[in-house]
Amino acid sequence: MSETVFYILAGFILIFSVLTVTSRRILRTAVYLFFVLLGTCGFFFAMEFNFLGAVQLTVYAGGIVVIIIFSIMLTSDLQDKLEAAGVSKIFFSLLAVTAGAAVCISTILSYKFPALTNNVLDSSMNTIGLRLLGYQENGFVLPFEVISILLLAAMIGSIIIAKKADVNK
Amino acid sequence: MNFNIYDFTGFVNSIKQWLNSVFPPAVADITGFVIIGICFLTFITLLGLSLVYIERKVCAFFQQRLGPMRVGFWGTAQTVADIIKLIFKEPLIAKGSDKFLFNLAAFIVIVAPFMAIAAVPFAKGLHVLDFDIGLFFITAVSSIGVTGILLAGWSSNNKYSLIGAMRSGAQIVSYELSVVLSLLTIIVLTGSLQLSAIIESQRDGWWIFKGNIPAIIAFFIFIIASTAESNRGPFDMAEAESELTAGFHTEYSGIKFAYFFLAEYINLFIIAAVGATVFFGGWMPLHIGNFEFFNKIMDFIPPIIWFFGKIAALIFLIMWFKWTFPRLRIDQLLTLEWKYLLPINLVNLLMMSVVALNGWHF
């Protein structure tokens, strides 16, 4: 059962990944990307990492894709089409893709995945919450706080950029 | 069949056992999924039909008229007639629109609430998805819907649709913050995101009573923000018909228009269900601490009636808002969220943490 689910999800992601890079309408590529991210989220739920699955949904499918679609809506027209790629462009991108795929596949095939038997990962919400804010061993409170400062800096930066100049001056 | 109106666990298990005894395991699983799916589809259809009827009646009574009266007894068959009309209508597609995205958008909008409704606990044992991240799952899948709205506005090739979609996208994304933060205020007390655990923690009283002042403030923020998040009046700027005809679904007709309509009403139900579960104990009857005699009397009323009673009360409250308050302007709407609700919410969350740490709640 879980194997069938895996193959269905894998096929889904593969098809939409290819469509994402080959479509010539810019908003459609964003929508195909949305489906790829939904498929990844399906993997997390299939592996019962429910928290990661829901984070994938909110952050990527509900957040980043919405930002992308917003920016496309503000900048481009419905009839706009990207120009078709030239022969040399197709050739070199195919080359880069094959090289990247070869490196990944050879690494994956050479790695022997040892099955976890004795200590199965506890991915319940409680454990994740305690570990994220834990300052003892295996705690992640320092990276958590550093990331929150980074986010704060990003937000203040974007407000300053978006702020209109003072009209009275 | 051991059917018990107070606890559905045995009933669900007996169906499961019967399926497993008749079919091989894989087929039994799939049959189970299909049965659950059909149950939900039927439920959602009936829900949509009855909510549209109730909305029209509530609206009519607020405006001192009778509303639909001619089809069926007191107009009860009016919405059935409407949906039959919508099914037989020609689905028009505007010239120059992106057909693929145009059709897809309606489905994305309807899929999000379909997924969220699976995690709603209807009664004890009557609960399809009981994740340990239950509440987070509902907010996560609801956030997909906004993509559908943006796509609908963009692919229609219509200025009004585009502006409507932009407004409603900005509105949903901003008010989502307040909804989640106000729910988080109660999660400080429950210590769990699992919906069944949240309900269980209200066995000796609902959080709105037990949680002191911060819980009441959180409920007010929740009901305001979630009304806005579902694009309902007085926050229905996206559809402001006087300025934008009908916002992002201007170009939709027939059954696809019905999808947008249905999605709005299922969202209304999910908001009421989440509010009832987190603040009013879900299907948990009204209990007061260790007042055994009173609790016993309340337990006689079946949980499913408690659940739907609370939901009906919350839905009526939200409809009441729509038909009494005047519509806000878009800048007022965003000011309300970012300058008032969000800061109040953050202070309230801090207050709740202090209350929880000092044990000042009940």
Image (cartoon, coloured by chain):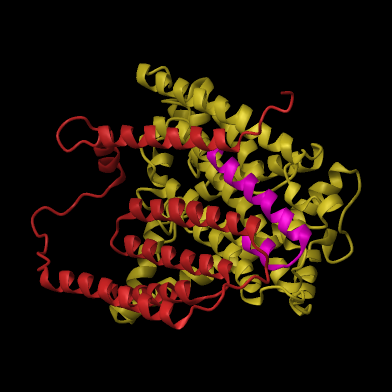
Chain colours: A red, B yellow
Name the chief secondary structure element in magenta.
helix
Provide residue A111's location: percent of width, then percent of height. 11, 68
Which is nearer the eye, A123 or B17? A123
Residue found at the very far front of the displayed protein: A88
Residue found at the very far right of the displayed protein: B65
At 11% across and 60% down in the image, what residue appears?
A116
Q: Where the C terminus of chain B falls, by quadrant? A: top left
**Residue B281 visible, this orientation:** no
Which is nearer the eye, B254 or B39? B254
> How many numbered tags mark residues here?
0
Q: Is residue A29 above or below residue B167?
A: below
The reply, left or right, for residue A108 in relation to residue A19 is left
Q: Quadrant of residue B68?
A: bottom right
At 42% across and 37% down in the image, what residue appears?
A151
Provide residue B125's location: percent of width, then percent of height. 41, 54
Q: Where the N terminus of chain B falls, by quadrant? A: bottom left
The reply, left or right, for residue B248 in relation to residue A61 is right
**Is residue B332 shown in magenta?**
no
At 77% across and 73% down in the image, what residue appears?
B86
Residues rendered magenta in the picture: B150-178
Q: In which quarter of the image is residue B20?
A: bottom left
Provide residue A82's location: percent of width, then percent of height. 57, 72
Which is nearer the eye, B269 or B202? B269
Provide residue B226's location: percent of width, then percent of height. 61, 42
The reply, left or right, for residue B15 in relation to residue B86 is left
Q: Is residue B14 above or below residue B213?
A: below
